[in-house]
Amino acid sequence: MNERSTLTVNEKGHLEIGGADCVELAKNFGTPLYVMDEEYIRRMMRVYRDTIQKEYDGNGMVLYASKAFSCKAIYRIAEEEGLGVDVVSGGELYTALQAGFPAEKIYMHGNNKLPYEIQEGLDAKIGCIVADSYSEIDLIDCEAKKRGIRQTVLLRVNPGVEAHTHAFVQTATTDSKFGFSLQDGTAEAITKYALSKENILLEGYHCHIGSQIFEKQSFALAVKKCMDFVALMRDKLSFVPTKMNFGGGYGVWYTDEDKKLPPEGYSEYVEELIAELKKQSKEKNLPLPYLLIEPGRSIVGEAGITLYTVGAIKEIPGVKTYLAVDGGMFDNPRYALYQSKYTPILANRANEENTQIVSIAGKCCESGDLIAVNVNLPKAERGDILAILSTGAYNYSMAMNYNRNFIPPCVLVKEGVAEYIVKPQTYEDLVRNDVLPERLKK
Ligand code: LLP
């Protein structure tokens, strides 16, 4: 059991999240169902916010990386907790604005922002655009000029730190589609270019070294490399950034192969990053910049579970046993994409001992439509409620309607009460944008 969240087992032997009985949730809302625990999300947001407050005199802001889980409710929670947000598309921007999120606390990302996305960002008066190409600098400058403003911009740089779960290595050259390399002069060149633009107010740099990273040293190394570069830019171009954004990437628990941390444990990542930033700034005689961090997965990942109903069970003698559930890659494509690992629990018999090894399959017409492979479970039967843990990040946000399956609804639970924050789709939703040309009409 994952004792770091509000996941427990009640006296009926049912899994509970945020005080809500998962068997009741399945009965009342149907399956598949995403369940998000509000308390956990708020706790995580506060840990990051309070660490910046305490360790950095509040001279910074936490941006929730909304690609991890985006819907109106999460932007409301982020605002209530005093966070800003990072958006990566017109759609995420629109959702945030629809939720009434303050535009000045929105940062816009993307390696290929489309002209209309930049225009919409400027029209909404968003706080900052993190630029990632020359053509984008031109576009921002031109659109800002039309509006008679100077748009605040950060430049995305690539510090060449490659981080992994078990080791981190430094790469001399980088082949990422994101950012400008600090090593080969390209970051310097784009800095000069951005500084030459009248309607761009260059405030600093952004980097993001990757996701699901557990090594604190990787983040510190990125800070060091960025600050080396900052000192160089001061010396060569007399440009001193006032803001530095070090991205997100803090790892979460999916299975017992991953490090377990209580929400409060995540302050360590930020403390280490801040300590390095202070050290570097002092050594280089640079003013402390306004600090931004962008956690996504760690805020919502462990806050979410997905509930399914077990359907067909297929035993292939001597090979494996498949439990098929009523969801699949359309609500969680992460196994299909990354062979990601997850921990399942039979929510209606959560105290029972594991006695079998099974693979959990979805209902799509694809052999690779799997949720978890070779996992331990008690003997499962058709009709059991299966919970997959740690699905709060990059599940709903990456869901799709493949095979014209419904993207499941999502409920937010707090103190035992569950409410929809994303309602169920209907068949009409699936055909809403379908058009029959005249010649095909019956
Ligand atoms: N900032 C930037 C610029 C990013 O690109 C990302 C994630 C984040 C912040 C948030 O990182 P986090 O704290 O969530 O690790 N779909 C993949 C994850 C892709 C992450 C992309 N960027 C997955 O399911 O694992």
Image (cartoon, rainbow, N blue to C red):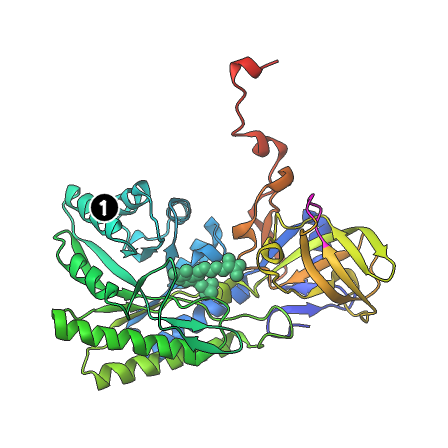
Relative to 430, is 356 on the left or the right? right
Q: Quadrant of the N terminus?
A: bottom right
Instruction: State the extent of the magenta-drawn residues as a range.
Output: 361-366
Residue type indicated by callout 1: Leu
Label total for image: 1
The image position of residue 23, as x and y in percent, is: 74, 56
Residue highlighted by disc 1: 139
Q: Is the magenta stretch mostly helix, strand or loop?
A: loop
Relative to 36, is 28 on the left or the right? right
Give above or below for 155 relative to 291. Answer: above
Mark 1 sits near ligand 1, with its Cβ under 8 Å away? no
The image position of residue 269, as x and y in percent, is: 43, 77
Residue located at (46% from left, 77% from top): 168
* Residue that protrudes farthest toward the right in the picture: 317
Q: Residues within 10 Å of mark 1 (few under 14, many from 20)?
A: some
Residue 21 seen from this side: no
Q: Is mark 1 on a helix, strand or loop?
A: helix
Residue located at (81% from left, 71% from top): 353
Q: In the image, ligand 1 is in what quadrant?
A: bottom left
Residue 173 seen from this side: yes
The image position of residue 286, as x and y in percent, is: 19, 79
**Looking at this view, is 75 or 290 the one in front?**
290
Residue located at (68% from left, 46% from top): 366
Relative to 267, is 281 on the left or the right? left
The image position of residue 35, as x and y in percent, is: 61, 56
Relative to 328, is 195 on the left or the right? left
Give above or below for 397 relative to 220. Answer: above
